Each structure stands twice: as structure tokens, then as C-alpha cells.
Amino acid sequence: GSSGVAAAAGLYRYLRDFCGCHLSWSGAQLRLPDPLPRLRAEIRAAAPGRYRYYQNVCAQSYSFVWWDWARWEREIDWMALSGINLAPAFAGQEAVWQRVYRTLGLNQTEIDKYFTGPAFLAWNRMGNLRRWAGPLPPAWHLKQLYLQYRIVERMRSLGMTTVLPAFAGHVPQGILRVFPRVNATRLGHWSHFDCTYSCIYLLDPEDPMFQVIGTLFLKELIKEFGTDHVYSADTFNEMTPLSSDPAYLSRVSSAIFRSMTGADPKALWLMQGWLFQHQPDFWQPAQVRALLHGVPLGRMIVLDLFAESKPVYQWTESFYGQPFIWCMLHNFGGNHGLFGTVEAINHGPFAARRFPNSTMVGTGLVPEGIEQNDMVYELMNELGWRQEPLDLASWVTRYSERRYGAANAAAASAWRLLLRSVYNCTGVCVNHNRSPLVRRPSLRMDTELWYNASDVYEAWRLLLSAGAELGSSPTFLYDLVDVTRQAAQQLVSDYYLSIRQAFQSHALPELLTAGGVLVYDLLPELDSLLSSHSLFLLGRWLENARAMATSDREAEQYELNARNQVTLWGPSGNILDYANKQLGGLVLDYYGVRWSLFVSVLVESLNSGRPFHQDQFNQAVLQVERGFIYNKKHYPAVPAGDTMEISKKLFLKYYP
């Protein structure tokens, strides 16, 4: 191997293609043949692009926030085996920022009013959010520094290039007290947060303090962790700049880059290209070109973050000459739900390379949350090393054999069905799970699917029929839970439509029947299915949060962070259910209780003849949602029940 990563990727190719092994977030299948197969001839492979990038800034909060070193080490090893050679190392940056702010003269109260709690730091770093669910305890900083030392050491030892954070221009309000003449402007509010928790100050790029703060931070960071000369900064993530004047936008990017080179003359800026497709009305060609050309050509790499659905390189003449990485975003908020755009990712990177004057320098995986839909990531990782598209049907057949450690006709058929349906969303596909199961109930819910529901039901039947042969495989049991969960999610939509129809037709018996089955049988059965597998437990997420704490008070704060993120996402449902998960405990005590209230309110409306008011329901259900966050209930972190038996029971009752 030309690097540790290349050698590791070669090792995984041998394990995968010659030994029939498989490695993923949900488990490994590593039964090696004895003796190990010998290669008849040398096999050489070269990736078509310089970089294979991994990680989304949001995943730092949605997925990695409560990780200990053992979990990080496993991820970094998986990255190396997958051929990833460029990735952020963002842990511990708040400890360094705190040091810089104290040096500049801010007091602890001013710093505490700026940092969010751990589960929301991704949006604090991008200038979207401040203070919410904070402050950060001193022990948090120490633990994160310790993790960061180990993360960068491990990544570099394997030959990966680490990306460190840089100054993007956002500052705490305390800066204005210490430097009253500084030129800083308040940005507008972010998403559905008002200025209590958003509206962060942005330093004017021309202000001398911009360079002072940016360079001071980066020098301090490099002194602490060393550097591979690649830095990340996102100034306008989902935030409208103060002016659309191209000259202003060029000054901003130039100032950010100068603050990098002030600390490291070899600096290369890695920037997320999300802003261009998120606010296309603002980012017209002139504005995009101005921002990109504020930095010398070749000294910036842009992540075309959502290239499988909304590629930006096509309408910006390949980012006007700046190098870019073709990225698959795939997942928002770490939601559960089978989803993929396999045809788009099988052809997209190759089309981008053939684009006139293409500046593409690699491929990337940038999900907002991980530990879902393993197959899509295995496929994308393999495509990063390919010179041409794959035959997907034969690829997925081999995938199922490797994943379960045995060839099984029913399992392979199930995967081919899933591949052509739920995993093959075409057109502009945005994967937010909008199923009624995980959304606040109303009479106007979206039940549209991009695939044939019957294909998932049939895949469920096929997987169950393979259970006798494959039931001892951990990866098989994970997939059985996931496919059964998807089938149950579809069934919830059917019952919701029956509930709505019955209510609108004033048919009380039908409303009671459909509502009763949903609330008292289907949702509890789904909850017990999820509770039978360790990777679908709310208790695991909460226990990992508490394990980061060094006192009871910290443990309570971290648990509230963890509960709020997957439900209300803010003090009053500001980004409600954006990070929804289907976890044992959450389905029963959060989604189930909401549905129960909804059905009772509809029944009461029919009984009394008073109309249903969504606004009144929303106020009542907000108390239920808040109640879940503060219920102090202990959720088990160890699975209970037999996955196969529970899936069979659901199948016998509900298979349409």
C-alpha cells in the first residue's frame, strides 16, 4: 500500500472478495476460510481520485457525541478498511476556544452563555446556535481533549489526513465588551429559534480582530494537536450573508483564508458546499464565484455535499475551478428508515469526472447520522475505488452472502427486492423520515412513498423464511429488525389513513377499531421488536450520554441533551422530530403516547360534536412531548426478547 489506508483497504478487499467477509456499523461477519485462499496473481488497484472523504459536521452531534475511545477506535479502523483518507478531527475544539477567549479577556459567564450543550455543538460551531442546553462543564473539555489526542494520533498513524477546525468569523457577545470598537454584526435567527438562542455575532472581515482571533485560535490548536494543513470553516451554513455584493463575499472568504495562512502558510481550506444548494436564490453564479475566488485556486476543496440529489458542480462550471469532492449525503438527522439512491450513486461520480473541465478530486460519505442502511455505505465505499459503475443486482446478491456468511436464495431475493424499491429513489430525493409514526399527529400527514410498499412486505416474508438457516447471524437479526420495522412503519400509515377516513366520515366504531389496533397493539409490538436488539435501544443512547459525566448533575444534563435532541430539538419543539429515531422505549413512551392522545381527542370530538382544532391539540401534545424528556424513567440498555419470534408474531398478525 502507498499508505496505511491503502494497505488497510487492500486487506479489506481480500477479506471481502476472497474470504467472503463483511464489516459494518451493525456488525461483522469474519468467519475466515481455513486455509486462507492464496491469490493466483498480484492484484493492483488505484483509486481514481486523490481523496475518499468521510463525516458530516452534524454527525459530530447526531452520532459521535457520546462516544468513548473504544467506539472511536472501532470507527477509525472501519474508516481505514473502507479506504477513507480524509476526515475531520473536531473533538476538543471548545477547550481550545475557551483558552483563546480567556486570553482575549472574556470571563467564564460570557463563555458559558455562548457554548451549547454537547448534543448541539455542531450548530454552535457553524454560528447557528448558542447557549441552548449548555453550559459545557469543565470535565467535558478535559475528556474531549483526551479523545482528540487519541483520534488524531490513530488517524495519522494509518496515513489519514486530518481536517482541523478553523475560525469562521463567529464570536461570543463578550468580545464586544472587551473590544467595544470592534465591527461585528448580529446575524439573523436560525431555523425556528429566536434570538434567545441564535442571532450570533459575525466579525467584519476587514476588522483587524478577525485576523487576531483566527490566527490565535489556529496557532493554539496546532500547538496542541499538530497539523496536516487542512482546515474546515463554514461561515454561512443556512445563514444569509449580510450583503449579496460579490466584493463583500470575496472579502469574507479571503479573510478566513488569511487567518488560516497566518498560522499555517501551507493551509488548505475544506468548505461544505451545502449553502449553495440550500439557498439557491441568494447564491447566484456571481455570489458563488465571488466566495470561491476569494481564495487562490487550488487552496480550497469544496464538498459537493448533496451531489447524489442536488449536485452543485453542474451549474457552477465545476466550482469555478476550485477542486471538489463528490459527496453522498443520504441521511438527515440520523433518522431510521430504509432509503437509498443506488442508481444515482452508481453513476453520479463517474459523470462528474467526465464533466467538461472537471475539478473533482474524490468521493465522500457525509451522512448527518450513521448506524443505518449499511448497504448504501458499503456500496459507496466500493465505488470510491472503481473506474466504472457496478452491476447492482449481482453486487447486492454477493453482499447478502458476505453479510450473513452463507448463500441463501430467499435472503438474496429479499435484497434484490429492496435494492430495486426502497433503495432506488430517483429524482430529487431528500431522506427525512416523514412517516406518521415519527411525526406529530395531524389530519394532514404525508403518507407518500417513493417505492412499492408490497416489495418491502415481500422482502420481510423472504427474510423470515431464511431465519431457520441464518438466524444465528447477528447481521441477519439486525436486518430482520430493520425490515420488520420498515414494514411496521408502512402499516402505521395504513392505520393512520383508516383513522382519518373514519373521523372525516363520522364513523365512531371504525375510528375506535383502527385507533385501538394502532395504539394498543401495533405500536407496543413494534416497541418490543426494537427492544429485542441492542442497536435499537433508547437506553443505549441515554446510558452512553450518562457515561460521559463525572457527577450526577452532569449525568442529568447530558441525559436531557440526549432526550431533547431526538424529540423536541429545542426548548419548544423548534426543530421537532428532525432527529427522530425508532428505538425501543421511544416508540412506546413518546410516539405511542402522542398517538394515544390524538385518537382520544378525535373520539372526544365525534362524541361531543365539537370540531377538532390542530392548534389546541399541538398545545396539549407539547406537554406530552416535554413530559417524555423529563420523565426520569430508566430505559434498559440491554435487549430483551427473541427477535425472530417477535417478528414472526407481527408477521402473522399484520402481513397484508
Image: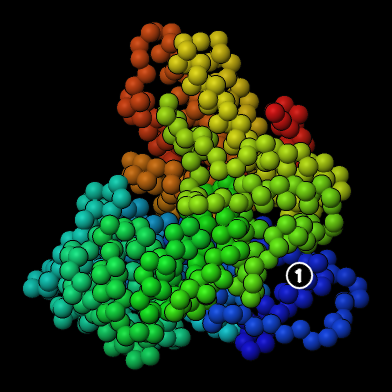
Q: Position of residue 501 (x, y in %)?
A: 50, 19
- Label 1 sits on a secondary structure element that is helix
Q: Farthest top residue?
A: 608
Viewer-closest of 146 and 204: 204
Q: Quadrant of the C terminus?
A: top right
**Residue lying furthest bottom in this view?**
265
Q: Is residue 568 left or right of residue 508?
A: left
Residues packed near mark 1 inside 10 Å, few (<14), some (14 to 19) or many (20 plus): some
Residue at position x 68%, y 66% in the image: 390
Given the image, on which type of amino acid does mark 1 rest?
Arg
Which residue does the numbered mark 1 point to in the structure image?
16
Rendered residue at 15%/78% (across/down): 206
Q: Is residue 640 left or right of residue 443?
A: right
Q: Give the tally of numbered discs.
A: 1
| Residue 77 seen from this side | no
Residue farthest along the left direction in this orientation: 181
Image location of residue 535, percent across then percent down: 63, 51
> Which residue in the rendered view is the most extreme toward the front?
356
Residue placed most toward the observer, 620 or 271:
271
Residue 430 position in % (x across, y down): 47, 51
Q: Quadrant of residue 587?
A: top right
In the depicted structure, whether residue 550 falls above or below residue 579: below
Q: Residue at x 45, y 32 (%)?
A: 445
Looking at the image, can residue 499 be seen?
yes
Q: Is residue 545 above or below residue 201?
A: above
Residue 115 versus residue 250: which sits nearer the camera?
250
- The answer to whether residue 400 is left or right of residue 52 is right
Q: Quadrant of the N terminus?
A: bottom right
Q: Quadrant of residue 359?
A: bottom left
Vertical order, 173 against 589 (above or below): below
Can you give x and y, in whole percent of width and height, for residue 23 in the image?
70, 65
Q: Residue at x 35, y 89 (%)?
A: 264
